[in-house]
Image (cartoon, rainbow, N blue to C red):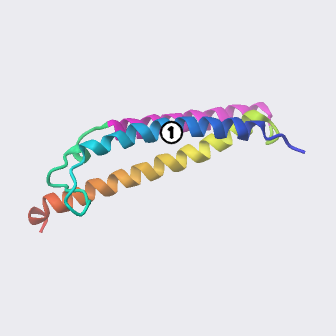
Amino acid sequence: MTTITGMVVSSIVVAILGTVFAMVIGSMNKKVVRDHNGKIDFTKSNIYFYWSRWDTIITIAAVYTFLCITGLLVFLLRGDNINSPIIQFFIHQTFVFSLITFLWFITKLAYVYKGIKERWSDELQ
């Protein structure tokens, strides 16, 4: 029977880091201008067109993911297997934070491209 200590600790770390990251990114919503329907007005919202906390959090999450991959490689080369709590921790962290980083990056790109399309659509044609 395998121990699940690494997954439990990893889940706690994911919950704490994910909550902190989400709060930092979510606090940017007060700077977003919305129209009367609640949609983002990209002609008045400049936050998506310059480096913001969102970009910093994406970069921090990507660096953390890289460090988790490196830690996983080191412990695997050392001879540990899946029963090791450290391997379980790094596998879980790597999977979750690579997924989060990828989704945040794609979402940020989608907002930027949509903002460019709405703001400068006449110049693109």
120 in the magenta segment:
no
Tell me what residue is drawn at x 21 percent, y 50 percent. Answer: 33
Instruction: Give the residue type that dot 1 points to.
Output: Thr
* Quarter-of-image position of residue 3: top right
Tell me what residue is drawn at x 18 percent, y 62 percent. Answer: 118
User: Callout 1: 10 Å neighbours few (<14), some, many (20+)?
Assistant: few
Residue 45 appears at what percent x and percent y?
19, 49
Tell me what residue is drawn at x 46 percent, y 38 percent. Answer: 21
Residue 102 appears at what percent x and percent y?
47, 50
Q: Nearer the viewer, residue 122 or 69?
A: 122
Residue 88 appears at what percent x and percent y?
73, 40
> What residue did someone put label 1 on?
19
**Magenta region, mostly helix, strand or loop?**
helix
* Quarter-of-image position of residue 85: top right
**Considering the numbered disc 1 on the image, is that residue within a helix, a strand or a loop?**
helix
Residue 69 appears at what percent x and percent y?
61, 38
Is the N terminus in the top left, top right, bottom left or bottom right quadrant? top right
* Residue range highlighted in magenta: 53-80
The answer to whether residue 9 is left or right of residue 70 is: right
Is the C terminus in the top left, top right, bottom left or bottom right quadrant? bottom left
